[in-house]
Structure formats: C-alpha cells, structure tokens
Image: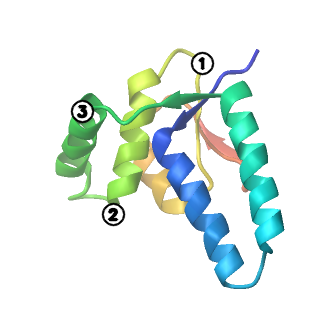
Amino acid sequence: AVQIWLSELARVELHSVFVRKVREGELTEAILQAVLECFREDLHSRFQVVPLTDDIVERAISLLLSQAKNHPLRTLDALHIASAQAVEKSGLAFVTADKKLFTAASGLFSRIIDPEAKVGLGP
C-alpha cells in the first residue's frame, strides 16, 4: 500500500484555499462543506499526518539559514520540507506542484515529483 505523508500545515492551507474560493464566488458554502467533509474522511483513512514539532521547526530554521541565501525559500515551504525530511524513508518521493517549493527541495530528496508537469527528479 502507498503511504501518503502530509504536513499538518497542509490541513490549514487546504482550508485557506477553499475559503478563499467561497469568498471570491468560485464555490458555494455547500460545496465548501462537502469538500471539507471529504478531506476530513481522507485525512483519517488515507494520510499519515506529520505534526509540527519543535524538531521540525528547528529543521526549518536550519534550512532557511543554509538554503535561503541561494534559493528563495519561504517560511511555509521550509516547514513542508522539514516535515518531509522528518519522515523520509527509502523509496518515498517528495511531491509538490509548487514551482518554488520544487526548486527549493531539489537536492534535498532522492525523488521529487511535480504531479502537474509529470516531471520528477530521481529514480
């Protein structure tokens, strides 16, 4: 079975995206509630959630200090990378459709996949 690890940050980001879509008139409140209910169900049945621990925050700070001088690394991106590093196991891929996050994560993981571009780095 495929394990999907998800940073706790993604929970907040998903809510932010869909609430914005309601505010901008792209979704109705009813659709928002249906989407959030599906996400809650998936969260408990399909995903392993990586909690934001002190260790992950420290890893993110280290990434910012070491990487941000050469690559634009945003705060939340550093936390996503640090979360993935905390659970990185053989064969796991770091998956992101965010171009800046993809670039920042390059060289930090053996496999990186952009699902929108169908392009990845690594075996």
Image location (x, y in percent) of residue 10 = 54, 48
Mark number, residue 54: 3
Q: Identify the residue at image location x=54%, y=15%.
A: 90
88 on left or right of 55: right
75 on left or right of 50: left
Q: Earlier in the sequence, mark 3 or mark 1?
A: 3
- Per the image, the residue denoted by label 1 is 91
- Per the image, the residue denoted by label 2 is 72
Q: Amino acid at mark 2?
A: Pro
Residue contact at pointers 2 and 1, CB within 8 angstroms: no
Mark 1 secondary-structure assignment: loop
Q: Earlier in the sequence, mark 2 or mark 1?
A: 2
Residue contact at pointers 3 and 2, CB within 8 angstroms: no
Query: Front-most of 78 and 32?
Result: 32
Mark 3 secondary-structure assignment: helix
Foreground label between 3 and 2: 3
For the C terminus, which image quadrant?
Answer: top right
Image location (x, y in percent) of residue 121 = 58, 39
Q: Identify the residue at image location x=43%, y=44%.
A: 80
With respect to residue 113, does 31 lie above or below?
below
> Quadrant of the rendered structure where residue 116 is?
bottom right
Image location (x, y in percent) of residue 45 = 73, 26
With respect to residue 35, does 81 lie above or below?
above
8 on left or right of 33: left
| Label 3 to label 2: alpha-carbon separation | 23 Å
Q: Identify the residue at image location x=60%, y=18%.
A: 91
Image location (x, y in percent) of residue 32 = 75, 63
Mark number, residue 103: none
